[in-house]
Amino acid sequence: FCPFLVTAAVVGTLGGAVVAAPFVLGAAGFTAAGITAGSYAAGMMSAAAVANGGAVAAGSTMAVLQSLACMSSSAVCGVYGACVSR
């Protein structure tokens, strides 16, 4: 058991997740500019709105994913010091 290797693996995994977030969210249709028409995210948003009487509830999975998409570029810039463009 080597604590250094475990720490390195955790940091590498978290760093990879931060870098991948904008790409994964963007591919699903969550972008900083909003939901992409016809995307998986648009279908989620429609279902969430229908289930909630016409609006997307604050704090819902849909709202959190959209917020993450808006913040993801800033998070990548802050953690790595250089922006990763989509």
Image: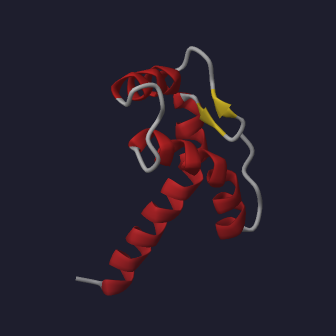
Q: Residue at x 55, y 50 (%)?
A: 68
Q: Pick whichever, 44 or 26, lies toward us.
A: 44
Look at 38% across and 84% down and name the residue there.
4
Q: Nearer the viewer, residue 37 or 85?
A: 37
As drawn, 52 above or below 83: above
Q: Where is the N terminus found, in terms of image quarters?
A: bottom left
| Left or right for 41, reference 69 | left
Looking at the image, which residue sits at the far front?
53
**Residue 76 percent location from the top left of the image:** 66, 59
Give residue 11's position: percent from left, percent from top.
46, 71
Which color scheme is applied?
secondary structure
Residue sticking out furthest to the left: 1
**Residue at horizontal 59 percent and vertical 53 percent from the top:** 19
Q: Residue at x 43, y 75 (%)?
A: 8
Q: Is residue 48 above or below residue 2?
A: above
Of all residues shown, which one is farthest toward the top? 38
Is 52 rendered above or below residue 82? above
In front of the other: 7 or 59: 59
